[in-house]
Image (cartoon, rainbow, N blue to C red):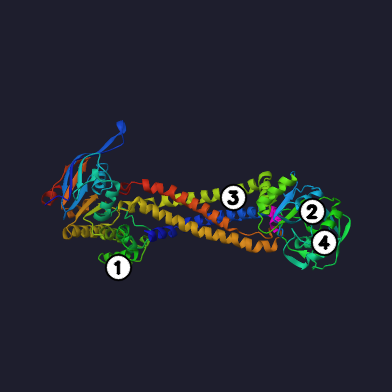
């Protein structure tokens, strides 16, 4: 299968001169659509930086990172924004729902950003919330919902525009075990049934069994990168 | 995106209200003070602009403005009349007198006009007729002056007033535009005025030109013929206003207040809006991560600013309009004051500047915010 994401000798450094700090040290990675990939590792291992580059929010310092055939290093800010707008969905650790908007409006944000009429986008938001059993909560504000419900709204928001890549930053960190399991099951199903690539950065060992591929990082390097067939041995 | 911007704005009631009130206060202060200044400066020339049918004012070269009248020789009148294009020319006296009544001993302004042509006379009458000024030792007074001299009394013609120890009979009450100097205005025929002031020389000569003549050209001809200053009415009004602008502290005082209104509005709105953006920076970052462009975020911010500015301006300008609708009717010092369209326009431009500055300064933070920040 052709790789949806391909990284070759990817390096990312922050700062200049003597204060420069290299966070990624020559990452090589190929990820395919239809997979749920978990990137794990201790704090400071570089997993969030790698995720940021794969999410087209950060450019590498050197090396090659290609997302759906586009070389990230060569894209302008506007091109990166367009790629994110159409092909990337985001799920954040703290949900990052906009407090002033209802669940349906929050879910509709990617469509609104892409230029869809507001009312149609919110209606689509209501429909997609229905798929996550949140129809009766669609008019509620984030403060009126539980953490699990908010994260499901965030998942709905990440998927509403049918992105090819779903980026998840610690999606279960703020959830109890049951809610976390529900969210991961949804993400796992999405990867499998919609032929999308789902990348999850997490510390949460409880959800490793959902991974089709588990990438472990340490000190800016990938220390193990098995596929599903041998991931269980590592977990 | 616009609806999201509005929902985010109104969700923060405290800051929205602070910004609206900041703009409203700034608008009220700037519009009200600017309009008062505008009307006050217009009043310095109100005698000139309200003078009926006067085309050209001839004055002493040593006289800078209306309230600093010169003393012209009697013979000058005939010299002016002899200039081709002058239909008629009449003396006009502007003096200061003491009026003495049972309730009132104060200074007043005496205006002596030609009662035949009524050139330079006020146009609005309350009681009586200016034709009555053809008689000797009679006078007309402005409505406000009447209230000062005979407070709380109905207008009664035929009563007497001592003016510079001359007993004059009231024959008319007029309603001229407010003068800059708050004193009663006593109108008499010029012969009575000569007698009352004890000065047989006119302060100005007022000229009516023949049809087809040009006031500017004729003014130049009169000046050349007589050696005195001759100006079309508009120019004399402008030079009178300019004198007050240049030689009094009024403009700088009003300017300081208006600038303070601008600065207070700018400080309140810019600071509050910056805080609003700072508190929403993560939400804006999330939208940026999802592909929102800097221009989309700028549009959102400008819309928020425009709405706050629009509501605040409406409240502030409504307050100023209410002031000028009600206060001039009850407070004599503000009689005739109004809110000119120039003040509306310039205040709107100032508020637009404030909101644009606040918006563009604040949005810089969101534009510089890297989308990768939301993943940290």
Badge 2 and badge 3 both on one subunit: yes
Q: Mark 3, mark 1: which one is toward the viewer?
A: 3
The residue marked by circle 1 belongs to what chain?
A
In the picture, residue B190 is in which quadrant? Answer: bottom right
Q: Mark 2, mark 3: which one is toward the viewer?
A: 2
The residue marked by circle 4 belongs to what chain?
B
Where disc 3 sits, the SS reads: helix
Numbered mark located on residue B297 in the image: none
Give the residues in magenta.
B43-50
Q: Which residue is mark 3?
A: B258
Q: Is residue B335 visible?
A: yes
Q: Nearer the viewer, residue B185 or B283?
A: B185
Decide which of tag 4 and tag 3 comes sooner along the chain: 4
Q: What whole-number distance in Å separates the C-alpha atoms at marks 3 and 1?
A: 54 Å
Numbered mark located on residue B139 in the image: 4
Numbered mark located on residue A135 in the image: 1
Q: Which residue is mark 2?
A: B93
Residue at the extreme top of the image, as rendered: A18
Badge 4 and badge 1 both on one subunit: no
Q: What whole-number distance in Å separates the C-alpha atoms at marks 1 and 2?
A: 87 Å
| Badge 1: residue crowd in 10 Å (few <14, some 14–19, many ≥20) | some
Residue B140 percent location from the top left of the image:
80, 62
Q: What whole-number distance in Å separates the C-alpha atoms at marks 4 and 1?
A: 86 Å
Q: Left or right: where does residue B97 sit relative to residue B10?
A: right
> What secondary structure do most residues of the magenta stretch adopt?
helix
Decide which of tag 2 and tag 3 comes sooner along the chain: 2
Residue B311 percent location from the top left of the image:
50, 60
């Amino acid at each position: 299968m052709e790789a949806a994401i391909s990284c070759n000798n990817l390096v990312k450094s922050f700062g200049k001169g003597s204060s420069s700090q290299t966070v990624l040290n020559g990452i090589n990675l190929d990820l395919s659509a239809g997979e749920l990939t978990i990137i794990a590792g201790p704090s400071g291992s570089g997993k969030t930086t790698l995720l940021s580059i794969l999410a087209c929010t950060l450019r590498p310092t050197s090396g090659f990172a290609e997302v759906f055939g586009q070389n990230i290093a060569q894209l302008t800010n506007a091109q990166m924004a367009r790629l994110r707008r159409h092909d990337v969905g985001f799920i954040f650790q703290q949900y990052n729902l906009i407090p002033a908007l209802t669940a349906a409006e929050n879910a509709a944000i990617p469509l609104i950003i892409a230029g869809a009429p507001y009312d149609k986008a919110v209606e689509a938001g209501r429909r997609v919330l229905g798929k996550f059993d949140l129809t009766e909560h669609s008019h509620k504000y984030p403060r009126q919902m539980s953490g699990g419900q908010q994260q499901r709204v965030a998942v709905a928001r990440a998927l509403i525009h049918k992105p090819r890549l779903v980026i998840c930053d610690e999606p279960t960190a703020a959830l109890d075990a049951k809610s976390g399991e529900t969210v991961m099951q949804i993400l796992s199903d999405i990867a499998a049934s919609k032929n999308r690539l789902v990348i999850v950065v997490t510390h949460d060992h409880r959800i490793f069994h959902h991974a089709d591929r588990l990438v472990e990082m340490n000190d800016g390097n990938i220390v193990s990168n098995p596929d599903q067939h041998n991931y269980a041995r590592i977990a | 995106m616009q609806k999201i911007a509005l929902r985010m704005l109104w969700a923060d009631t405290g800051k929205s209200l602070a910004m609206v009130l900041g703009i409203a206060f700034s608008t009220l202060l700037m519009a009200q003070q600017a309009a008062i200044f505008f009307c006050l400066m217009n009043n310095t020339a109100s005698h000139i602009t309200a003078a009926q049918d006067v085309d050209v004012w001839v004055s002493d070269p040593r006289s800078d403005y209306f309230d600093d009248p010169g003393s012209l020789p009697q013979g000058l009148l005939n010299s002016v009349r002899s200039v081709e294009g002058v239909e008629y020319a009449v003396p006009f006296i502007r003096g200061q007198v003491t009026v003495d009544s049972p309730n009132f001993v104060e200074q007043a302004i005496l205006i002596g006009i030609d009662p035949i042509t009524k050139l330079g006379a006020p146009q609005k009458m309350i009681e009586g007729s200016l034709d009555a000024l053809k008689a000797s030792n009679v006078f007309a007074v402005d409505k406000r002056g009447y209230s000062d001299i005979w407070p709380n009394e109905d207008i009664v013609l035929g009563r007497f007033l001592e003016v510079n120890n001359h007993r004059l009979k009231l024959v008319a009450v007029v309603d001229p535009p407010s003068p800059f100097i708050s004193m009663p205005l006593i109108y008499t025929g010029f012969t009575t005025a000569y007698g009352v002031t004890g000065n047989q020389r006119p302060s100005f000569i007022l000229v009516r030109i023949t049809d087809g003549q040009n006031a500017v050209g004729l003014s130049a001809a009169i000046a050349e013929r007589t050696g005195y200053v001759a100006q079309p009415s508009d120019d004399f009004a402008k030079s009178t206003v300019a004198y007050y602008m240049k030689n009094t502290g009024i403009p700088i005082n009003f300017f300081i207040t208006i600038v303070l209104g601008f600065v207070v509005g700018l400080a309140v709105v810019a600071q509050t809006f910056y805080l609003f953006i700072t508190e929403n920076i993560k939400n804006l970052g999330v939208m940026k991560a999802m592909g929102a462009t800097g221009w989309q975020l700028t549009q959102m911010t400008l819309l928020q600013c425009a709405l706050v500015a629009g509501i605040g301006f409406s409240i502030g300008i409504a307050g100023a309009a209410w002031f000028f609708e009600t206060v001039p009717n009850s407070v004599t010092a503000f009689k005739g004051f109004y809110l000119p369209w120039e003040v509306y326009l310039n205040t709107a431009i100032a508020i637009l500047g404030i909101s644009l500055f606040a918006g563009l300064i604040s949005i810089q933070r969101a534009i510089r915010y890297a989308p990768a920040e939301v993943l940290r």
